[in-house]
Amino acid sequence: MEFTFFSIDGNIWIFVGVSILLVLFTIYSYLYTIPEISKNKKTILIILRSFSLLLTLFLIFNPKLIYSSYKEIQPKLALLLDNSMSMKMKDRSYDRETVYSKILRNFDYKLFDGNIDIYAFDDDIKQISNFNFDSLALNGKTTNISKAIQYISKLADEKNYQALAIASDGAFNSGSNPIYLVDNFPKPIFAVGIGDTLPPKDILIKSIISSEVTFVNNKVDVSAQISITGYPNRILPIMLYENDRLIDTKEIKTIDKTTNYNFTFTYQPQTEGIHKITISIPRAEEEYSIENNSNSTFIKVIKNKKIISIFSSAPNSDVSFLNQYLTQDKEIKVNQYIQKFQSTFYITPTDKDIQETQLFILIDFPSATTPENVINQIVRQLEQGKPLLFVWGNKLDRKKLQILKDYLPIEISSFSNREFLAGVAVNENINDNPLMRIDGVADAPKQWQSLPPIFKTETFTTPKINSKILAFSTVDNVKMQEPIIAISDFGSRRSVVVLGYGLYRWKLLGTAKEISRGNLEQIDLFSVFIGNTIRWLSISNVDQQVIVKTLKKQFSSTEPVEFVGNVWDNSLNPIDNATVQIELKGNNYKKIIDMVATGNGNYYAKMASLPKGDYAFDAKAILSNSVLGNSEGRFSVGAINFELLDLTMNKSLLQHLAKYSNGMFFENNADGLENQILNLKNFEKINKLVQNEFEFINRWWALILLVITFSLEWFIRKKLSLI
């Protein structure tokens, strides 16, 4: 059955109405002419112009001639064949390649009268036109069953696939779990399982679990998940390597009927850098494979914990509360240098202490008795771009404060140590600043204004050119034009000043008081502000603005290596127009890779499979000829054969695919598979509607005809000297 109809974009009545108006307009325009011409000539000109205008309108409405017909499509079988390396294993009971070959050679393809499509799959899938068993190389390094089934699902309607048969060991090691795809593929799945459910003698390091980042001389646990089959009641040596250098050896004792073990080393790195950590067990007698006897990961070792130094002219509650908050973070080391009497400290800061400090917090410091050499040492570190949090106090000495003036975001107009209580009013122009942001709260300015007041001296200040006022002080809920929180962000130099003290009141009289009244949802604004401030100051190190990493630490030698990255400015806003390049280095290998921006500060790069070995990369982000930052990392290719991570047939998976799709499961044979498929009720031909469109707007002759008619009218008018 065939049928044809005509279609346009838009309302047909609008098309008809506009067409009539165009014809009437054309007739009217030629009703009177100068000079007057004959009626026949007018008729010709009216016809030419009307045709041109109507053809133009016709093309604007994008007309289509649609002709449809029903096509008879025979039912088809999609046959998926596992092409991975595990299909040529010799396990306890079977030579898989021999079994596989026998099944495929005995399968009666002729019964399907050509209505069978054969595909080979490993990590990818491809169709085989002229199939024979030699078409399968059985060299795939990974098995992605989900990808293969999803591919067939997309073609099912078009090809009329009424059944799917899959021959595999079911041991997938790439992609998602195929179990979840049964509901998305409404046709019967016939699974032919190949292999043994009993594993051969083998020692397998399944995975290594450890922290991705640690510190020099810091002890960290490195745990291995191990599978040992066929070696009960044995003592086996297990070794730990750092960058292929043996650093520790221990013993693991196996137990009868137990195959899975967890073993932990204590690793204490001595140098910084990205270190390759490997756990290995030597080959045992009659072991199936040695390739899976080791596994590796990478640990980034940094010089030390983040060192924050608090300086204060005297012990006070702000020091105690700040220290209590900061020490909750195990990655932060807090040093306290508190003046005791005149120029002495409870703990005297050394030159090394000050040099190693990464963030300075000065609370009511310096005072009149503070040694100038200590202030000058701090200034030398601030000159190098180290960040500063400055909390005002009533013991500050104006003369010694002048030594720090270049690193504060404010200029002092008048100085006094007399004090009063002041509240906080967020600057409405910049209430989305990272320091004043409260995640999940829409009325952040109102929350800050509800804080109990803190002490403020009668010192008046003005912000510097490169500074911002985040909050003004309030007295009796009346906003003053005097800043209470100000920041400076110039180049890589960041500083924050709180022009008041007694921040502990935010905790004690704000959060703690409300909680004691039963308001358990009260936000701890003291912790919010200090946390936001420390994070904002900490990213003064530009390297943290650029992060590039691989999707995983280990790749097979046949799969692509993918890089993902993020680039931010120094206020954590995403940057989409940076140039991000990766310099990749390996054994006798070097390549520059350009990353592509994908939006919202995200970048991506993908390259073909790499030769086996260890690789290091250094990524650099550049914007307007300025380097935004760098990111480095390491990964391995081919260090572990994923096909050797599971040496048994995944019978339960294959049975599940068959059972819940109303198919059948066959184990190491396919006897009667053809008849089971051909006898399916749904295995029959279908009539499919095939629709084709003829679009006039894409035809070259329509444009030529339009040009000819307009040109012919113009030519006749020219000859007749019409105005």
Image (spheres, rainbow, N blue to C red):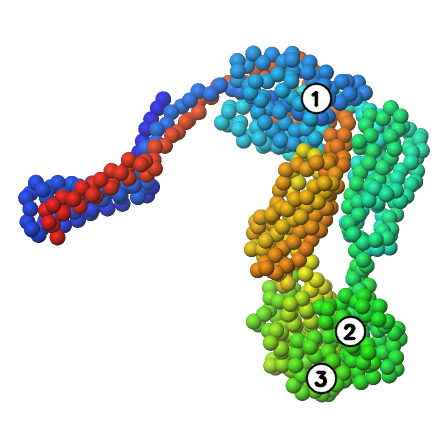
Q: Tell me: 608 left or right of 705.
A: right
* Residue nearest the viewer, comparing 310 with 614: 614
Q: Earlier in the sequence, mark 1 or mark 2?
A: 1
Q: Position of residue 459 (x, y in %)?
A: 69, 85
- Judge whether residue 412 can be spotted in this image: yes
Give the amino acid at mark 3: Thr
Name the quarter where the N terminus is drawn: top left
* Residue drawn 88% across the image and 42% down it: 246
In the displayed structure, would residue 290 be above or below residue 336? Answer: above
Q: What percent of the width, then of the height, locates residue 125?
A: 60, 29
455 lies above or below 565: below
Task: Kindly indicate the quadrant of the structure image that contains residue 388.
Answer: bottom right
- Circle 2 crowding by C-alpha within 10 Å: few under 14, some 14–19, many from 20: some
The secondary element bearing badge 2 is classed as helix
* Badge 3 density bin: few <14, some 14–19, many ≥20, Cα 10 Å: some
Disc 3 to disc 1: CB gap under 8 Å: no
Which of disc 2 and disc 3 is earlier in sequence? 2
Q: In x, y percent, where is residue 417? A: 74, 86
Callout 3: SS: strand
C-alpha span from label 1 to label 2:
71 Å
| Residue situated in front as seen by the camera: 627 or 503 | 627
Q: Compared with residue 16, is residue 406 higher up or lower down, i.e. above or below? A: below
The secondary element bearing badge 1 is classed as strand
Identify residue type, mark 2: Ile
| Labelled disc at residue 457 | 3
Question: Which residue position is annotated with label 2?
Answer: 378
Q: Nearer the viewer, mark 3 or mark 2?
A: 2
Q: Which residue ends up furthest to the front in the rendered image?
A: 588
> In the rendered view, does 617 fall on the left or right side of 330?
left
**Marks 1, 2: nearer the viewer:** 2
